[in-house]
Image (cartoon, rainbow, N blue to C red):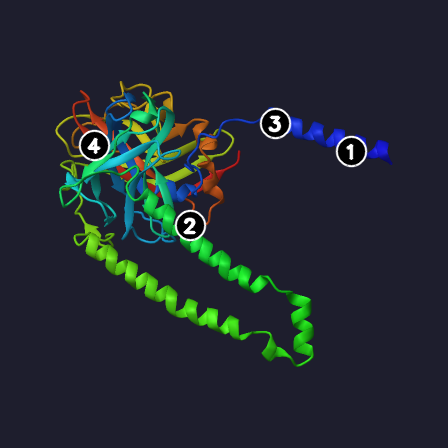
Amino acid sequence: MKTIFIKCLMLLGFILSLYTLNIQTVLAHGEKALEPFIRMRTIQWYDVQWDKQKFNVNDEVSVSGKFHVAEDWPVSVPKPEASFLNISTPGPVLIRTERYLNGKPFMNSVALQPGGDYSFKIVLKGRLPGRYHIHPFFNLQDAGQVMGPGMWLEIAGDAADFSNEIKTINGELVDMETFGLSNGILWHAFWGLLATAWLLWWVRRPLFIARYRMLQAGLEDELITSNDRLIAKGMLIGVPVLVLAINAMTNSQYPNTIPLQAALDQILPLSAQVNAGVVDVETLKAEYRVAERAMTFTVNVKNSSESPIQIGEFATANVHFLNKHLQSPYQGDVNMMTAPEGLLLDNPAPIQPGEQRTLTITTKDALWESEKLNGLIRDADSRVGGLLFLYDDHLGKRFISSISAAVIPKFN
């Protein structure tokens, strides 16, 4: 029996060692957690840029860009009437100091309008040294986080040098890293000790079986003593009195306070794009070929501009498919979430002014599978969405169209 037990332990140790051999550092922030149709047809990010990737503790870094709120908003996702723009980080490695939407500073949640375009900027300050993968994201009420493009940031320096001092409304300079810390610890300890004492007062006596027998014997009146009632009355009166007294003392010590804000900002989208009505794109059909990991769009493009245009990029859920026959002005990291030769056209010739043409666009790359966007064909809402970028003949002007269509899966 002893030999069998030892062998079982050895087998268990071997199995555990196999798991530990494949341990990898977790780098994701839930980019793939939401269903594909939410990631592709809600917040459509573009032109997202960081002003620097290497900086020191206490230095500021900013991320800016734009996003389009899709017109074809999923019917199963609540409208973006309360959304919060933030930064996803692996812990408190940065602090947010400023935030702007369409050039306006804001600190609350904001109501977004489907079909609108917005510009944003977030200013951050380095706090903890290290190398971190950071994302801007929108937290949609009752839907979850829609992540923007991620970027690796390197923070150098010493964490002990970090400073987060602000001046209060009374002119007092305080360190936000330690302000109120001792007071918070004191009150947490006090309420914890009080709760523990109250619990111990009741559990110091024999519990379940003894009390059950007393109930069966008709001695329920003796379960609660006069001391129990006296202490309960003291707690019932003393706790509210103490809370009200400390609240009055705090109001007296800090007469000028600003409560946590619960308002909802109303910021209108950017003015309608100059190219609105100049270049019109209508999606006629979308097919996903499972074996080839390729999404094919049939679109009708009408060019009412004064110069020839070409399709240069399709972007969805932070994945970029670029036209290899066009010198793409895409400025993002081509090593991450980008298929440099992933967009093909059945007719690559420029669309002339006044011309209307039906095109077949093929976006083909393993990113459809690795980013779990191919799961769209198994969703209850099998519609694809994204931004199509078109450029004039000299890449001097860009036209953006948000497209969407129901997806027809092809398995052969």
Q: Position of residue 305 (x, y in %)?
A: 14, 32
Q: Label 1 vs label 4: CA separation?
A: 66 Å
Quadrant holding the N terminus: top right
Label placed on residue 20: 3
* Residue that carries the numbered disc 1 in the rendered image: 8
Q: Looking at the image, is mark 3 or mark 4 earlier in the sequence?
A: 3
Left or right, 253 with reference to 296: left
Q: Position of residue 4 (x, y in %)?
A: 84, 33
The reply to whether residue 380 is in sight is yes
Secondary structure beneath dot 3 equals helix
Neighbourhood count class around disc 2 (C-alpha, 10 Å): few under 14, some 14–19, many 20 upward: few
Q: Label 3 vs label 4: CA separation?
A: 50 Å
* Residue that carries the numbered disc 4 in the rendered image: 399
Q: Quadrant of residue 45?
A: top left
Q: Looking at the image, is mark 3 or mark 2 earlier in the sequence?
A: 3
- Residue at image coords 34%, 28%: 128
Q: Label 2 vs label 4: CA separation?
A: 60 Å
* Residue that carries the numbered disc 2 in the rendered image: 189
